[in-house]
């Protein structure tokens, strides 16, 4: 069993239908052979996560919705992320703070001059930033086709909205090129998996 001095936080991000949940699960299974893994998700499976899921399918004020997502994140960081990292685990989160910066950066675009920075600022001082983030990139039209095929729809599955979210994600990646690794998610699963595992191994080598 590999030993780490302190845990590592790896997050998976992308627009709806980008395939990040499948990839997060597969990577967790791979790493599970050598390390202690915590696989988790945002929105969480707790009661605050349930409220968030309710808001996603409701006509709620975008600012109120942001704070629900942020409340869910605060609980997630305190009860799941921090304890697991303190135990030296590798934590894999299917969505994390970049989802807020990209999605709520889009829903709040007409409220603030720089919505991404505004959303980032309310996380400052208490969130735990990821060590490594994989941004799965598919064109919004491909992503929308995948979403429609699985018939689990949210109000965010709209092509124009998805384009805005994708643009926000790309902006975040440009700002943090060392942390955020862009993955072409239209490639086959196996190739993507190799690419992601390669980057993770490379990162782990720098940490032990
Ligand atoms: P998720 O359950 O990950 O959906 P999917 O598996 O389809 O990607 O997330 C639900 C929706 O909530 C998704 O459309 C993304 C959105 N979301 C935000 O808008 N902000 C956030 O902070 C998070 C975590 C998710």
Image (spheres, rainbow, N blue to C red):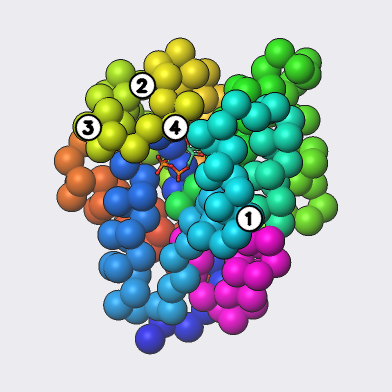
Q: Position of residue 120 (x, y in %)?
A: 73, 38
Question: How would you classify the magenta stretch by its main secondary structure?
Answer: helix
Q: Earlier in the sequence, mark 2 or mark 4?
A: 2
Of callouts 4 and 3, which one flags the residue occurring earlier in the amino acid sequence? 3
Determine the residue positioned at 52% across, 30% down.
169
Whether residue 202 is situated above or below residue 110 in the rendered picture: below
Mark 3 or mark 2: which is in front?
3
Number of callouts: 4
Answer yes or no: disc 3 within 8 Å of ligand 1. no
Residue 37 left/right relative to 61: left
User: Alpha-carbon distance for marks 3 and 1?
Assistant: 28 Å
Residue receiving disc 3: 149
Say which mark, if any, is on residue 154: 4
Taking the magenta stretch, the answer to whether it contains residue 178 is no
Residue located beneath label 1 in the image: 48
Q: Is residue 186 left or right of residue 208?
A: left
Residue placed under numbered mark 2 in the picture: 140
In this view of the protein, can residue 77 be seen by the observer? yes
Provide the residue span drawn in magenta.
75-93
Residue drawn at x 57%, y 53% as measured from the top left: 49
Q: Is mark 4 within 8 Å of ligand 1?
A: yes
């Amino acid at each position: 069993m590999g030993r780490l001095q302190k845990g590592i936080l790896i997050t998976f991000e992308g627009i709806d239908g980008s395939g990040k949940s499948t990839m997060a699960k597969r990577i967790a299974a791979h790493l599970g052979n050598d390390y202690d893994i915590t696989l988790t998700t945002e929105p969480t499976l707790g009661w605050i996560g349930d409220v968030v899921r309710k808001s996603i399918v409701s006509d709620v004020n975008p600012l109120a919705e942001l704070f629900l997502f942020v409340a869910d994140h605060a609980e997630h960081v305190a009860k799941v992320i921090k304890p697991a990292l303190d135990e030296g685990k590798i934590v894999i989160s299917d969505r994390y703070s970049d989802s807020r910066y990209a999605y709520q950066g889009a829903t709040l675009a007409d409220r603030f001059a720089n919505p991404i920075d505004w959303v980032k600022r309310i996380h400052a001082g208490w969130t735990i930033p990821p060590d490594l983030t994989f941004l799965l990139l598919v064109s919004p039209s491909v992503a929308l086709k995948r979403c429609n095929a699985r018939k689990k729809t949210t109000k965010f599955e709209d092509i124009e909205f998805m384009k805005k979210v994708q643009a926000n994600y790309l902006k975040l990646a440009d700002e943090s090129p060392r942390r955020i690794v862009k993955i072409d998610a239209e490639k086959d699963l196996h190739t993507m998996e190799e690419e992601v595992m390669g980057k993770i191994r490379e990162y782990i080598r720098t940490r032990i």
